[in-house]
Every structure is written in structure tokens, then in C-alpha cells.
Amino acid sequence: MKNFYGKRILVTGGAGFLGSHLCERLLGEGHEVVCADNFYTGRKANIRHLLANPFFEVIRHDICFPLYIEVDEIYNLACPASPVHYQFDPVQTTKTSVHGSINMLGLAKRVRAKILQASTSEVYGDPDVHPQPESYWGRVNPIGFRSCYDEGKRCAETLFFDYHRQHKLQIKVARIFNTYGPRMHPNDGRVVSNFIMQALQGEDITIYGDGSQTRSFCYVDDLIDGLIRLMNTPDDFTGPVNIGNPGEFSILRLAEIIIGLTGSGSRIRFEPLPADDPTQRKPDISLAMEKLDWRPGIHLEEGLKKTIEYLRQFADKGK
Ligand SMILES: NC(=O)c1ccc[n+]([C@@H]2O[C@H](COP(=O)([O-])OP(=O)(O)OC[C@H]3O[C@@H](n4cnc5c(N)ncnc54)[C@H](O)[C@@H]3O)[C@@H](O)[C@H]2O)c1
């Protein structure tokens, strides 16, 4: 189904943080891109700069319903990703991962498209193995507040592998770890955007727990590069593959770096840890290095500077 220009690629969740960067990169590589989004957490502002491109198309669509279009590849990114958003309507979150995956896999099967799933490090739950290799099965609470997201994503992985085994679909599963960068939601409660917004507005920086819990942070450009490399791997490679930055920082250290970069006078305030919050999370990226020839290249401070510049507009508006 190749057209003269390149591939026709569907990006679900294309108006979101990661999706908008992916659409931009794929257009830049000469492909035709169809963005399907229900604008649940995505924003038109994220893709406004792409709308004039004749090879870019936007469809307002909820992937919980079937979609009939002709495409060569599908990147399935649609799903609210931050706890405030995915816990707002947990049933819809599970539906998006499960019904949404069934619909997108059904589409891939009909048009014989290759399909990539944006899975997550949350499939490892609160891990007792550190760092997490793909072979680790995870430690997830099936009935907690985070389960709609974690278990939804786990079920989506199951569906991808069953479609692969049963229907010989070409699948790729990426387990994405914490990613940050411009176009993050300013108020989505994720740690990087939270700290930056608090620092820019001179408010106290809230740390849940004692701040010793660690996270790894991947800059968006590195992440998108990993996803595209994964899509282009040979057919016999399905993943799952971890894509993230193994550089480990304590939450307290992150707060200190952000205070330094913003020149903020904010002070740090400690609050109780929410339920099921993992204490450590760090990807083992040996498989991505081997199969995708990929590793993140952007240092935390460099990425944070760009993110701070982006979020400054919202902080200024809030004043
Ligand atoms: N950002 C991260 O750190 C991270 C980490 C792990 C996994 N992921 C995964 O990557 C994907 C993108 O995450 P993001 O950070 O860009 O989040 P985001 O919330 O910015 O983007 C998600 C997009 O999906 C859309 N969407 C949600 N439900 C939909 C539905 N039913 N039908 C159509 N569109 C729908 C939203 O409107 C939004 O545009 C998600 O699947 C997420 O689980 C992200």
C-alpha cells in the first residue's frame, strides 16, 4: 500500500505529549501521517504547527471504537499517561488500553499494517528486581488506584502477543520509562512538570515521601528516536523492549537541580507517599542497545532547560 511519498502512518494519541513529537518526526522523514485523537488529554496546540502540512491529517476519534482507514504502520500511543488523568475515569482508561488495542490490532490485521504499542514501565509495578530487564514479570497490584493503567497496559501487551501468535501480525512493544520535555502538560501531576511549575511560580516544591525514591528521566527526542528505531527493526523482533534513560536520580536531587536551573527561591516540602508509588524504577536498556543500536544521548540538565523554557509560558500566565 505504499504511496509515492513514503509510508502512510497512523499515530493514535498523536495530539498528546509524545504523539505530537512523533508526528512531527515522521513528517520530517517524508511520511504521510494520520493523527487520531479524542483530545482527552491531548491539545490542538501541540499539533497546530503541523496542520498546514498537506501530508498531515487529524481525525477526532476515540480508539475504543473501530477505525477504518488504509495505513502501512500504526503507532498506538492513545492513553492518558499521568495518574491524575488516568485515575479521573479509570474505566475509560482500561477501555482505552484494552478495547483500543483490540480495535487497532483489528485494523492492523485488516490492512496488514505493522503495529507498535506504547507500553510502559508501569507493567513492572513496584519492582523487586532492579534495574528491570524485559524478562522481569513485574509486581503489580491488580485492584489499586493505579491498576486501571498498569493492568490495562499489561492486558494490551497480552493482546499484541496473541495477535502476533494467532494472526501472524507484525508487532513491536516498547516499554517506555518516564519521559519529559516540551509539550508535557503543565498540571498533570508528573514529577518533572510539577517541580518546574512550582519552581517557576516560586511555590514550595512538594516531595512525596522522603525524596530518596529514584526515577530515571528520558528526554522526549531520545524516546522518539527509540520508538522509530523499534518500528524499523527486522520482522522477527517484537520486543518488549525497554526504552528509557538508565541514569538514576533521587526525587530530592531532581528538585535541587530544577531549583538551580530556574534560579527559584522555592523551598522543598515533604508530604506522605501515595499508595502503590514505586520506590525505585530504572530501565535495563541492554536489549535496546543491542537490537535498536539505541541509547539516550541528552543529559538531564540539557533536557530540563528546554522543558523549563516551554513551561515558562504557563507559569507566566498563572501569575
Ligand atoms: N510520557 C511518559 O513518560 C510515558 C511513559 C510510559 C508510557 N507512556 C505511554 O505513551 C503514550 C503517550 O503518552 P503521553 O505522555 O504522550 O500522554 P498524553 O496524555 O500527553 O497523550 C495521550 C494522548 O492520547 C489521547 N487519548 C487518550 N485516550 C484516547 C482514546 N480513547 N482515543 C483516542 N485518543 C485518546 C489523548 O487525548 C492524548 O492526546 C501513552 O500510551 C502512555 O501510556 C508515556
Image (spheres, rainbow, N blue to C red):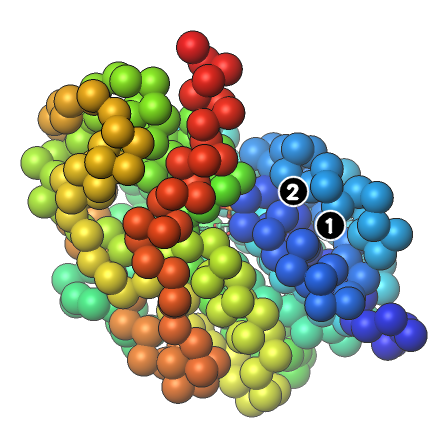
Q: Which amino acid type is marked by label 2? A: Ala
| Residue behind label 2 places its C-beta within 8 angstroms of ligand 1 | yes
Pointer 1 or 2: first along the chain: 2
Q: Nearer the viewer, residue 144 or 273?
A: 273
Residue 82 in sight here: no
Q: Which amino acid type is marked by label 1? A: Cys
- Quarter of the image with the N terminus is bottom right
| Residue behind label 1 places its C-beta within 8 angstroms of ligand 1 | no
- Indicate whether 148 appears above or below 117: above
Image position, residue 29 (x, y; %): 71, 68
- Indicate whether 163 appears above or below 317: below
| Mark 2 neighbour class, 10 Å CA radius: few under 14, some 14 to 19, many 20 or more | many
Q: Nearer the viewer, residue 132 or 168?
A: 132
Give the structural element (helix, strand or loop) at label 1: strand
Quadrant housing residue 40: top right
| Mark 1 neighbour class, 10 Å CA radius: few under 14, some 14 to 19, many 20 or more | many
Quadrant housing residue 299: bottom left
Q: Is residue 131 left or right of residue 163?
A: left
Residue at 87 percent of width and 71 percent of height = 5
Residue at 46 percent of width and 18 percent of height = 316
Residue furthest to the top: 319
Give the structural element (helix, strand or loop) at label 2: loop
Q: Which residue is mark 1?
A: 35
Residue at 53 percent of width and 67 percent of height = 225
- Whether residues under marks 1 and 2 lie with C-beta atoms below 8 angstroms apart, the answer is yes
Q: Nearer the viewer, residue 20 or 108?
A: 20
Residue furthest to the front: 263
Q: Which residue is mark 2?
A: 15
Residue at 61 percent of width and 79 percent of height = 232
Q: Nearer the viewer, residue 26 or 65?
A: 26
Image position, residue 267 (x, y; %): 15, 22
- Indicate whether 135 appears above or below 45: below
